[in-house]
Amino acid sequence: MTLCMRLLGSGGRVDSLRIMSGQMNERDFERAAHAAERLADRNAFVVDAYDMTPADIVADVAAHTEQGRVAVVVVDGLELLGLTVAEKDAALLAFRAMSRRHKCAVVVTLPTNPRDVAQRVNKRPFISDMREVTNLENASDVIIGLYRDEMYNLETSEQGIAEFIVLKNKNGPVGRVKAQFHTAHMRFNDLASDDV
């Protein structure tokens, strides 16, 4: 599923399976169209390409910055670039420099799948898990891990709940925040205060 389709599904609260299969009803089309209008009103651009190098990303952001301010850059899937650990570290440093140069936030998604997670009692992410993949800790101001108990425990009482775990925060506190995860819409929502 492309990023644009996910944005329409999430923003319009349309079931992602219906979008992928083309089985959308009239209400789904209306919701997706409304989400597309909201996205069009924002100064946003999406480059959904797997063949970009970190240098391509930096150059693309520089070009868009010339056309207007870029507030946030999301690199969704650093592992998809096919880089070695050393190249990933260099990319993270380049993204950090880009962030400072263009005064924009840079969000890099990076799956952590530590080899020993199946043997651990606590399957929540730790900073040490990321050391197998890259030296993210040194290149980041904030590191947030994502955990869903239902992925490991089918009998959990926290079905549809995700934890955002602030593992590192250079300028503030660390801790956990729970949110509702709506699988069909690929969307996170706030929990009511008594559910947290």
Image (cartoon, grey):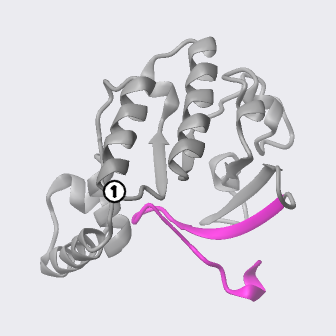
- Taking the spot 76% from the left edge, 55% from the top edge, the residue there is 165
| Quarter-of-image position of residue 140 | top right
- Taking the spot 60% from the left edge, 30% from the top edge, the residue there is 92
Q: Which residues are magenta?
A: 175-196
- Report the front residue among 24 and 103: 103
Q: Report x, y in % for residue 149.
A: 70, 54
- Report the front residue among 27 and 58: 58
Assess whether residue 121 is covered by the magenta stretch.
no
Left or right: where 5 falls relative to 97: left
Q: Amino acid at mark 1?
A: Arg
The reply to whether residue 110 is visible in this rendering is no
| Quarter-of-image position of residue 42 | bottom left
Question: What residue is disc 1 on?
Answer: 6
Residue 63 sits above or below residue 158 on the image: above
Residue 160 sits above or below residue 112 on the image: below
Residue 91 sits above or below residue 150 on the image: above
Q: Report x, y in % for residue 169.
A: 81, 52
Residue 146 sits above or below residue 177 on the image: above
Q: Quadrant of the C terminus?
A: bottom right
The reply to whether residue 84 is visible in this rendering is yes
- Taking the spot 56% from the left edge, 15% from the top edge, the residue there is 87
Q: Report x, y in % for residue 52.
A: 34, 26
As helix, strand or loop, the secondary structure at mark 1 comes to helix
Left or right: where 49 falls relative to 54: left
- Taking the spot 76% from the left edge, 24% from the top edge, the residue there is 131
